[in-house]
Amino acid sequence: VQLQASGGGLVQPGGSLRLSCTGSGIVFSINTNAMGWYRQTPGKPRELVAVIFSGGNTNYADSVTGRFTISRDNAKNTMYLQMNSLKPEDTAVYYCYAEVPGRQYWGQGTLVTVSS
């Protein structure tokens, strides 16, 4: 099983980015209980940003509610994180994960830098 995260980059405050997480060796719509995105900055614990459950329900960290949207395209076996109104404090490495019964799989991380 592999998760490939992409879409990070440098963006100005107020801008937008869309992160993608594509799976191989796993079928998101069948195998997973939940999927989501964490982020981490140096010296801080990893923070759960958004999660989407198998039934389609979603949860978000308070810090991103109203600005970020998590979604999944089953046909493409890909999960997305649409990030709008980005702030400098959103700068972090973003990791996608997929939870199956008994374990989690992680992507390699993609760096998002919000700076003018």
Image (spheres, helix red, strand yellow):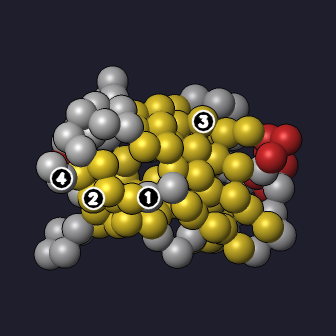
The answer to whether the residue labelled 4 contacts the one labelled 2, judged by CB atoms less than 8 Å apart, is: yes
Q: Mark 3 — residue?
A: 71
Choose top left, top right, bottom left or bottom right for residue 67. top left
Going by the numbered disc 4, the residue's amino acid type is Ser
- In the image, taking residue 42 as reference, residue 50 lies left or right, namely right
The residue at the point 79 percent across, 41 percent down is 74
Going by the numbered disc 2, the residue's amino acid type is Thr
Position in image of residue 55 (x %, y %): 69, 32
Position in image of residue 14 (x %, y %): 24, 33
User: Which mark's residue is nearer the viewer, 4 or 3?
Assistant: 4
Q: Mark 4 — residue?
A: 115
Label 3 environment density (alpha carbons within 10 Å; few <14, some 14–19, many ≥20): some
Q: CA distance from mark 2 to mark 1?
A: 8 Å
Going by the numbered disc 1, the residue's amino acid type is Gly
The residue at the point 15 percent across, 49 percent down is 116
Q: Mark 1 — residue?
A: 8
Label 4 environment density (alpha carbons within 10 Å; few <14, some 14–19, many ≥20): some
- In the image, taking residue 85 as reference, residue 81 lies left or right, namely right
